Amino acid sequence: MFTGIVQEIGIISSKEKTSSGISIEVDVEPTFLKNLEIGASIAVNGVCLTATKFNENSVAFDVIPETLRVTNLEEISVSSKVNMERSLKFGDEVGGHILSGHISCRAPAKLIESGDEVELAVECPDEWVNYIFLKGYVAINGASLTVAKKTDKSFSVFLIPETLSATNLSEVQNGNLLNIEVDQTTYAAVKAAEARLAET
């Protein structure tokens, strides 16, 4: 489990095809890897991955085809910046909201700057937009954010300076695919309501 508070912006230093997908290596600050163990879960752009090896300033992961199909990890290249978060430990502060690290979908987005405001607008696929609610939570590339606008086809969040500096969202180009994880509590509530309606 994760909290949606990005702890590190990692830099992809290697991306190689393997017989079971791809292998990526990410350069990070040594403090991010303190007390890490092989097999630990780390969110990379919001995707829960397993650490396969590491040294003092980098960590490697294997990414299978199914994960590549539903996330933007297929799109990253060497020198790409990725949002990183270590898994939640008992007693840790939950600064954002609880995330599973299982991406709901990937969606094209764009940054809209107007005066001092920076809006991130996301075109959400039809099968997921009904789980996005105004003022509700959503995770974008692993960052916990609050929905500020909502239409039948899209939603927007506003990015404060801290979010812009602490994540890779400041570098979004028009049409870039971002990883979206809907709030699991909202998802469960909507599914339960749909099931009750179907019974009537």
Image: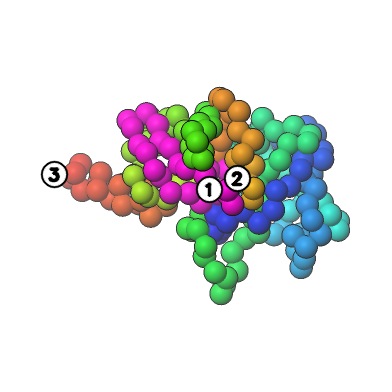
**SS category of the residue bearing label 3:** loop
Disc 3 target residue: 200
> What is the three-letter code of the residue carrying label 3?
Thr
Cβ atoms under marks 1 and 2 closer than 8 Å: yes
> What is the three-letter code of the residue carrying label 1?
Ile
Magenta part of the protein: which range? 140-164
Q: Residue furthest right?
A: 55
User: Residue at the location (56% across, 74% down)?
Assistant: 91
Q: Nearer the viewer's eye, disc 2 or disc 3?
A: 2
Magenta residue check for 90: no
User: Residue at the location (54% across, 58% down)?
Assistant: 3
64 vs 148, nearest the viewer: 148
Disc 2 target residue: 164
Disc 1 target residue: 160
Magenta residue check for 145: yes
Q: Is residue 38 visible?
A: yes
The x and y percentages for residue 136 are 37, 50
